[in-house]
Image (cartoon, helix red, strand yellow):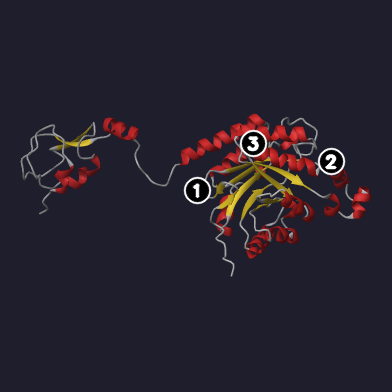
Amino acid sequence: MEKKLNYQNEITIENKIIGNNQPCYIIAEIGVNHNGNLILAKKLIDAAIDAGADAVKFQKRNLSSLYRKESLENPNIESQGFEILLAELKEVELSKKDYFSIVNYCKEKKITFLCTPWDVASVDFLEELDTPAYKIASGDMTNFPLIQYISKIKKPLIISTGMSRLEEIEKMVSFVKMQNTPFVLLHANSTYPSPIESLNVTLISEYAKKFNVLIGFSDHEVGIIGSLTAANIGAVIIELHITLDKKMKGLDHSSSLEPNEFKELIDMIRLSEKAKGTPIKKMTRAEVLQREVVSKSIIAMSDISEGDFFSEKNLEVKGPEKGLSAQFFFDIIGKKSPRKISSGEYLVDEDISNIETD
């Protein structure tokens, strides 16, 4: 019997572990920003590597498999938006030969190749490329036949949840868990570009509690604040579009980050990860030295004989901290001194541990 997965556990894509106690996994979404040009695609891969991304991601469509024959032959019978989209997609489609070249280039450059298949035919082709994990676009979050088809391959899924209702996400998460396939859920807003006030990254922690799965963030804003915030509140994956120039002609360039922006984001995420540290409270060496200078100890205000009672008349608090911490001042008041203590002398830890109580 197949072992049921724990969806809060880590998942692995190639040699990278993705999980709550791991570095945030950064995907540079090239998508169709290559504009159908292999040379541009490789330049974008290089830019992603220079920025420090863990993976680059493309999109693969088989238009005859994806859309109705009638819609392809007469796109004007559909909405104007579809007609414009179809024309753009035909312009940016890479050849199968191009994809093999891209995968080999990624292997050579030691960066993971990922891809979003929009249809079953594209899944089959991507399997020829030995794609290590699959992205499910927001538009296919409700496409259960496609999700099931990919799930049977038993490779990790990364599923975006833009332009969806909560009940649809709930149903999808239950369905994917039934497939017993490892996956990460990505919170997303599918507006291109997304206004900063629409990002609602608080949902990342809410989804983590509600669904008990790993949560990431697919960002379509024009800056980096949303992704940086998402990483800081627990997103295990950050996905953003990358472009060489936001002014280039194409579907997604305007809502993408240029290489210097992408690098700035990753650098800031890595710095914030260092700042997070661990949930264990301990003083650094520098803090220990600083404490000795600025913290306070209990000292004798006057000579105290063995057996004398400690009081606010014979004890005071002064720096630096070399003796018994001032936090024990009221604990020791009214107790007998276990030894002779000279005026100005520090009390020590043994003075409180050796106290006789009446």
Q: Residue at x 88, y 45 (%)?
A: 83
Q: Residues within 10 Å of mark 1 (few under 14, many from 20)?
A: few
- Dot 2, how many residues are within 10 Å of its Cα: few (below 14), some (14-19), or many (20+)? some
Which label number is shown at residue 21?
1
Q: Residues within 10 Å of mark 3 (few under 14, many from 20)?
A: few
**Element assignment for label 3:** helix
Three-letter code for the amino acid on which mark 1 is drawn: Asn
- Marks 3 & 2, CB-CB < 8 Å contact: no
* Disc number placed over residue 88 in the picture, else none: 2
Give how far across and how far down residue 29 sits, in percent. Answer: 69, 41
Residue drawn at x 27%, y 32% is 292
> Circle 1 — which element?
loop
- The location of residue 133, given as percent across then percent down, is 66, 51
Q: Nearer the viewer, mark 1 or mark 3?
A: 3
* Residue bearing the label numbered 3: 109
User: Percent x, y for residue 84?
Assistant: 86, 42
Query: Which tag, 1 or 3, sits closer to the chain's start?
Result: 1
Residue 329 falls left or right of residue 208: left
Amino acid of disc 3: Lys
Q: Which corner quadrant of the image does residue 47 belong to?
A: top right
